[in-house]
Image (spheres, helix red, strand yellow):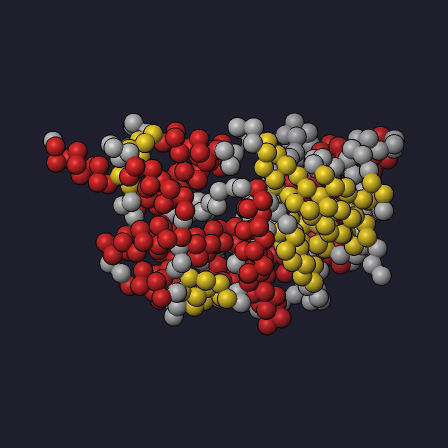
Amino acid sequence: MANHLIEVRSISKDFEGASGHQFRVLSEINLNIQEGEILAILGPSGSGKSTLLRIIAGLVQPTSGEVYYRNRPFTGTNPGVSMVFQSFALFPWLTVLENVELGLRYVPLTRAEKRQKAIEAIDMIGLDGFENAYPKELSGGMRQRVGLGRALVMEPDILLMDEPFSALDVLTAENLKRDLLELWQMGKIPTKAIVLVTHGIEEAVYMADRAIVLSRDPARVIHNLPIPLPHWRDRKSDPFTRLVDELYSIMTQQKEVRAIQQEAAQISRKITTIPNVTAGAVTGFIELIDDLGGRVDLYKIGESLSLDLEDLLPIVETARIFGFGDVLSGDFELTDIGKRLADATVLDRKTIVRDQALKHIPLMERILWVLESKRNGQMPREFFLEILQNSLGKSEAEQQLDTLISWGRYAELFAYDEDSKLIYSEEYELQETAQE
């Protein structure tokens, strides 16, 4: 039986929005981290993946629930983990050696012992000869290696990695992934488990032994998928692509995901939002799917467009919300209305989008109802912003309103004047023009 290094027991986390409203980011999260595995944590943008990782590290305290390290709860920071962040998080005034030595700051060793351990870590991560270089002299990949060396020099049981490759170019990221896996496979690092937060499904299948998938608003564990492929893994093999397709299918509108999100929305009384995606991105995506026969493998289309899940999923989700397509077994398939949209003229597209928006997006219908109930057909932007802020934080409310305004203008449901900050109905605009 596998040994559990970490157990996350019924973790929930609430944050307070700008208006004082409490909103839940994580809800009743239960998971374990086993000795000898790489665990990937996947989920849509804003699902709380990084928050969960920081709770495991002891950098953020949960609202409820506990984290156990080797069967015991802990206070403060977790003594068995080290963390590699998305940003390189290096001190620019320190050399590579000094940055790595920081990982041993509170370890009871002599100065000479700390220096020797840091030199060994630098050699292990492939930066021998750069001990006295400063971060500004290093490439992005080399700087992330310094962050990795600083984490590993502590000889942690668990290495936590928060999207460590996302700030790197593709070739550099691939090189670093391979080097890390080689160190892991050959037992050259002391770490007994690695937890990788990622938004890349292919990255998860390439590196991990198991993948945890989170929903959002709030985040819950919706799937725990073993990845039993031996290393090294062939990205073009059928078993590899089947697992990628399965994860795409899980993350893009499975019934289980929808049910959990709907339940969470009812509990928290939050407004259902739409992703921050433009009409042009969605219509262009629909056109491409139509040109490819009306149904495509999401993994393959993402690969051909050089889009990872973080970029592709909002487009897919928006198209699904509008009723233009659905996800079936990792494929995106156009609905009849989606095919109509792909073949429509510019003006007809606006009509289709307008009808679908009123049918599927309650917030859009609510804005239009308010405008139509006003004698002059207009309302200040601030009015709608305050409504959204009751359920969303200030930043998310601003972004959501901008998205709604963009789609509303495209569909000619209403207009917006940036100077006066007024949202007004199209009919009102025509009446004013006639009077002039």
Quadrant the N terminus occupies: bottom right
- Position of 161 relative to 345 (above/below): above
Q: Position of residue 114 (x, y in %)?
A: 83, 34
Q: Position of residue 36 (x, y in %)?
A: 79, 56
**Which of 28/344 is in front?**
28
- Residue 320 left/right relative to 21: left
Residue at the (87%, 33%) spot, across then down: 109
Q: Position of residue 139 (x, y in %)?
A: 59, 41
Query: Is residue 127 visible to us here?
Result: no
Quadrant the C terminus occupies: top left
- Residue 123 left/right relative to 407: right
Residue at the (40%, 65%) spot, across then down: 334
Residue at the (65%, 65%) spot, across then down: 233
Quarter of the image holding residue 435? Answer: top left
**Which of 203/172 is in front?**
203
- Residue 37 left/right relative to 279: right
**Which of 49/146 is in front?**
49
Q: Position of residue 35 (x, y in %)?
A: 81, 54
**Which of 295/266 is in front?**
266
Quarter of the image holding residue 412? Answer: top left
Query: Is residue 343 visible to us here?
Result: yes
Residue at the (65%, 27%) spot, across then down: 93
- Position of 246 relative to 72 (above/below): below
- Position of 144 relative to 181 (above/below): above
- Residue 188 left/right relative to 63: right
Tally the marks. 0
